[in-house]
Image (cartoon, rainbow, N blue to C red):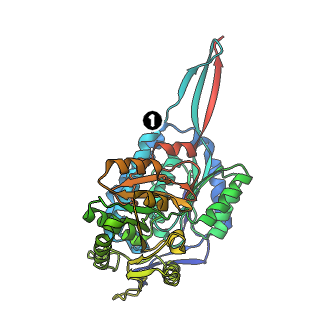
Amino acid sequence: MKTSYINGAFISAGNNVLENKNPSDLSDIVDRFSRAGRAEAEQAVAAATAATPAWGTSSPQERFDALDFIGSEILSRREELGALLSREEGKTLPEGIGEVTRAGYLFKFFAGEAVRIGGERLESVRKGATVDITREPVGVVGIITPWNFPIAIPAWKIAPALCYGNCVVFKPAELVPSSAWALAEIISRSGLPAGVFNMVVGPGSEVGDAIIGSDAVQAVTFTGSVNTGSMIAQRCAARMAKAQLELGGKNPLIVLDDANLEQAVDVAVQGGFYSTGQRCTASSRVIVTDGIYDDFIQRFVEKTQALRVGPALDETTQIGPVASESQLRQDLEYIDIAKQEGATLLAGGNRVEADSDGYYLQPTIFADVNNAMRICQEEVFGPVVTVSRVADYEAALAEANDTPFGLSSGICTTSLKYAEHYKRHAKAGMVMVNMPTAGVDYHVPFGGSKGSSYGPREQGRYAAEFYTRVKTAYQFAN
């Protein structure tokens, strides 16, 4: 039975057992975990607090060595770890290996950043004085991650936290603890002092609550639901702690009359259905101008119906299972809502029967929708895409921006004029031209606007804004 990692050791929390099931085959138990609670979370916070002074003043070389070790081992084991990820979360094997590879490069990137942490020296307006502007670690950082990217999202939060000298208390999603445990096991051998990194596997109501409410935790970074994120923001603000939130998305993909049709269909299929649509950056709303609409719909439906749904580790599978029973139930509920709202079902909409008992769902397309429908405004988080018809670019832009979210936004066009205009006027943190809305490089900032994100950006050099505080120091030369 696997356990949490606290103060440099793997520690059992008792006999409360968490079973990690394979969504491709519910008879397959991936792992069993000793489920931790509030007491273990508080122990982890105490260990991180005790380790903070020494790690916060550690050398750039110490940080580089640890992060580089972690990244190198992840990359050397990418096939093994990718298979584990796909088995527990349901991504296809190529997607699982790709996610693990991204995690390895994230640690490598922040290993390099550890020796590039800079500052400024300015002359004061007062004669004889100089000003040093430096960045210092925040302290103890609470990290709470979702189930849809069980190693990449932990990596892009843990790596910068350690890079900038913070200590970590990490709570992975209970649905996918095995990838998190594998990452923790690698980190345990990286040379980090005891208490610098801690992982606590347990429910949000206990472990997450203890992290969010602790005065010793100076910053909380969270990826998950809007409601939970709003609660975290309020509780952190009440005690003057930093909060970084990545929440929902209802991302549009515009297809203009001048678009390359084959390319646009590929972009829509990849952005909407790959990873079973379980990405906050998935393009769940496709907005097509009138001149290309009929041809696009025909090709889009044909290509969607040809997708092979099946077990994640089957090499012929293109779309794996939904990750859990509760998520499958939510997907089916939204499919029913769309029908009740008057949308036309063009493809999918039903469970898929397979040789193994799993959470399989057909990729689903709805047409004849309008932006007032719930199916166009609320995040489904599954392989469900709506397609709407609009008159022209101006109408498409207005509909694309008519959403409470603003994470990622895309357009397919051969017009430089419209591409440039859209990059400037799309109300989203990330804009893609002739590319799927899902998929961001590991070295660039990630985040959105409106209800999608709160706080500084994740990833890349912009991560320093959350994981550090700026200090201004004066010195007078006598």
Q: Is residue 112 above or below residue 213?
A: above
Amino acid type, label 1? Arg
Taking depth in this image into account, of 302 and 393 the one nearest to the observer is: 393
From this view, report whether residue 307 is shown above or below residue 414: below
**In the rendering, at what x and y percent does residue 299 appear?**
28, 73
Determine whether, in the image, residue 88 is placed left or right of residue 75.
right
Tag 1: Cα neighbours inside 10 Å, few (<14), some, or many (≥20)? few
Q: Quadrant of residue 404?
A: bottom right
Pick whichever, 279 or 337, lies toward us. 337
| x, y percent for residue 339 | 48, 83
Q: Let me know if residue 211 appears in the view.
A: no
Q: Tell me where residue 54 appears, x and y as whole percent.
A: 59, 41
* Above or below for 429 versus 64: below
Q: Position of residue 138 (x, y in %)?
A: 61, 44
The residue that appears at 31% across and 51% down in the rendered structure is: 415
Q: Nearer the viewer, residue 362 or 398?
A: 398
Left or right: 205 in relation to 153: right
Please tell me whether residue 203 is drawn above or below residue 186 in the rendered image: below
Q: In which quarter of the view is residue 367 placed?
A: bottom left
Q: Of helix, strand and loop, which one carries label 1? A: loop
What's the residue at 42%, 47% (across, down)? 444
| Residue drawn at the location 31% of the way across and 66% of the way down | 292
| Residue at mark 1 | 116
Residue 106 in sight in this render: yes
